[in-house]
């Protein structure tokens, strides 16, 4: 570490020199100077402050003025020793901030906000809220306190709750037509060289801890098993690598079958090229699939095997050999007579031998439980009939409970007399479906193997929802009005995007990345000579993470204030 000077020539021919604190780094075998702190113009430099800082550093190192006469003979008092007055973690936030800039989120926000003036940098406040979701998810009130006291975020000394809510309102306003999401995604696609040929879409729901629904938070089909609470529906589109493309938010009573046209139209202007959309069984209505074929699009869809569809029955009954794709996946393509259809619909039956064994084992266990329960009911009925000369209502209730059981009831059938028997026809029907799932596609070029493997990647969308609900703590949602709820989901989407990019570049899980970089701190030292903020040195693992993400390591000295 050393002092150096640079100079600039003015238009009138005068020379202005500047003093900098720098150190040398080796980059690709070449030594380069990295500026740590700009100390300002040489003619305005506080030389006495520098001398005091030199003396203070010498004191900290245990040296004396006799050892370093360059200190200028300044007397050293006992109080000149540096004292640690603060320490905040900064490594994880530093990495996220670097990715935030690489993806152009800061540029997109500043462009949309234009020349409007605010007392606090709105872009910095929004970044702090996104970083909080990724590092330590909290309410907006607690996040403002976290950003002000518990983490070191470059360019943001402090913020309050009102500034957080104002920034969220501006975010929703700026992303009215998904302008920010579009700009950010294409920046990611360029950085990671993504090929958006398969687009995976799925929905989830998240509930609110309130019993009072409104125009946005409504009762609906809950995917969190909480139909008793109001909810919203969230849609997420991701690439085959799991990179989130865009998110949507709808009222809680929205049906899956009604939203796919809006998703398709919302992405139409994004110039994604030839895209095959992959959807689950809940979106595979004929109207939805026809809509996805518009403008040359194609789809891969999961199909229901047990809804009585004539096509599904014909496909599953068609004989043919399976082809092995992986140890746990075999595929068979079936084509039906589609002379009345504009586009041929291809059917692919997928079979997982491991899942087939698991299905058979679960069914056998369920049948065993049903058999034992039926035997218990018959024994009790016989015993009570001998005592009372008739049936007992309690045993009739037991039969009703078994018939209506959510998992066991499917294996019994009720006779005209009201008695229950094991449904052997149902068992035979299910045996034929063990380990199978049915897909369809409109793409004439994809092989059956590619269709099956592409559909399995739909798990990336489900993993995105799982991370939003667990790692990023999507719930509980501490908001009640629609714009704030939308802003909260968008903040979670941005956080998911940043951690997915970090995971893809490093090959590590986000948990491991956050643990390693969370050990990098900004330590503030003060003495009579002034105050200096210095970061802890990076370990080999920490350096490899920031290098893999293309982010510069944090400077060793972030602030230097001579007294």
Image: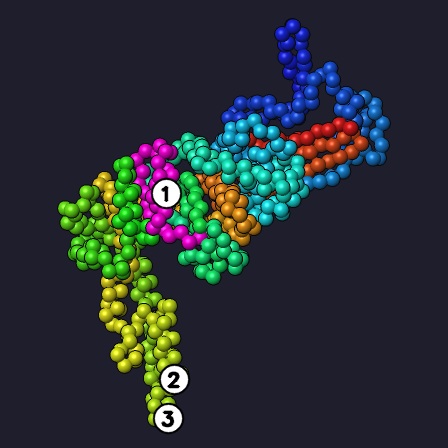
Question: Does the segment drawn in magenta span residue 259?
Answer: yes
Secondary element type, mark 1: helix
| Location of mark 1 (residue) | 262
Which residue of the protein is positioned furthest toward the front in this rendering? 215
**Dot label at residue 388:** 3
Residue 19: image location, x then y, percent? 68, 19
**Dot label at residue 393:** 2
The boundaries of the magenta stretch are 252-279
- In depth, the one of 130 and 544 nearer the eye is 130
Secondary element type, mark 3: helix
- Which quadrant is home to the N terminus? top right
From the viewer's perspective, tell me whether residue 304 is left or right of residue 473. left
Give me the residue at 63% from left, 43% from top.
161
Give me the residue at 26% from left, 37% from top.
296
- How far is the residue under mark 2 from the one under mark 3? 12 Å
From the viewer's perspective, tell me whether residue 70 is left or right of residue 97. right
Along the polypeptide, which appears first: circle 2 or circle 1? 1
- Assess whether mark 3 and mark 2 are in contact (beta carbons under 8 angstroms): no
Along the polypeptide, which appears first: circle 1 or circle 3? 1
Q: Is 459 above or below relative to 432?
A: above
Q: Is 269 above or below relative to 356?
A: above
């Amino acid at each position: 570490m050393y002092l150096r000077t640079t100079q600039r020539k003015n238009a009138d021919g005068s020379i202005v020199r500047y003093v900098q604190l720098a150190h040398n780094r080796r980059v690709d075998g070449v030594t380069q100077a990295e500026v740590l702190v700009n100390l300002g113009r040489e003619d305005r430099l506080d030389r006495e402050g520098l001398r005091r800082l030199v003396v203070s550093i010498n004191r900290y190192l245990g040296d004396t003025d006799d050892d370093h006469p360059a200190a200028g003979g300044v007397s050293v008092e006992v109080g000149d020793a540096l004292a640690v007055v603060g320490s905040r973690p900064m490594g994880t936030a530093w990495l996220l901030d670097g990715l935030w800039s690489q993806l152009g989120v800061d540029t997109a926000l500043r462009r949309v906000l234009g020349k409007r003036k605010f007392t606090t940098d709105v872009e910095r406040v929004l970044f702090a809220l996104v970083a909080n979701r990724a590092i330590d998810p909290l309410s907006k009130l607690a996040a403002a306190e976290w950003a002000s006291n518990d983490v070191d975020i470059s360019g943001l000394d402090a913020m309050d709750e009102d500034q957080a809510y104002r920034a969220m309102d501006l975010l929703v306003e700026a992303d009215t037509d998904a302008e920010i999401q579009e700009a950010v995604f294409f920046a990611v696609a360029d950085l990671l060289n993504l090929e958006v040929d398969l687009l995976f879409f799925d929905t989830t729901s998240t509930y609110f801890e309130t019993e009072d629904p409104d125009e946005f938070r409504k009762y609906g089909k809950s995917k969190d098993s909480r139909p008793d609470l109001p909810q919203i529906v969230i849609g997420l589109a991701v690439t085959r690598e799991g990179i989130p493309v865009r998110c949507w938010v709808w009222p809680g009573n929205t049906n899956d079958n009604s939203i796919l046209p809006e998703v398709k139209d919302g992405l139409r202007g994004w110039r994604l090229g030839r895209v095959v959309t992959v959807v689950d069984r809940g979106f595979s209505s004929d109207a939805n699939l026809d809509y996805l074929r518009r403008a040359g699009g194609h789809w891969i869809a999961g199909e229901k095997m047990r809804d009585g569809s004539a096509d599904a029955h014909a496909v599953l009954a068609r004989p043919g050999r399976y082809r092995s794709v992986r140890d746990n996946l075999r595929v068979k393509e079936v084509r039906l007579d589609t002379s009345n259809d504009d586009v041929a619909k291809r059917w692919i039956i997928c079979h997982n031998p491991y899942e087939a064994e698991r299905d058979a084992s679960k069914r056998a266990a369920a049948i065993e439980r049903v058999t034992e329960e039926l035997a218990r009911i018959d024994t009790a009925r016989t015993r009570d009939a001998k005592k009372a000369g008739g049936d007992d209502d309690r045993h009739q209730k037991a039969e009703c409970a078994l018939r209506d059981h959510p998992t066991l009831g499917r294996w019994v059938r009720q006779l005209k007399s009201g008695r229950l028997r094991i449904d052997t026809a149902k068992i035979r029907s299910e045996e034929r479906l063990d380990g199978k799932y049915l897909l369809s596609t409109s793409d004439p070029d994809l092989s059956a193997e590619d269709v099956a493997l592409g559909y399995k990647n739909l798990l990336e969308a489900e993993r995105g929802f799982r991370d939003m609900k667990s790692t990023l703590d999507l719930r509980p949602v501490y908001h009640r009005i629609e714009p704030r709820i939308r802003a909260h989901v968008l903040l979670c989407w941005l956080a998911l995007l940043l951690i997915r990019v970090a995971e893809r570049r490093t090959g590590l899980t986000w948990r491991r990345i956050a643990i390693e970089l969370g050990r990098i701190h900004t330590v503030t030292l003060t003495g009579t000579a002034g105050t200096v903020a210095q970061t802890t040195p990076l370990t080999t693992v920490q350096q490899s993470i920031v290098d893999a993400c293309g982010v510069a390591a944090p400077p060793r000295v972030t602030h230097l204030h001579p007294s």
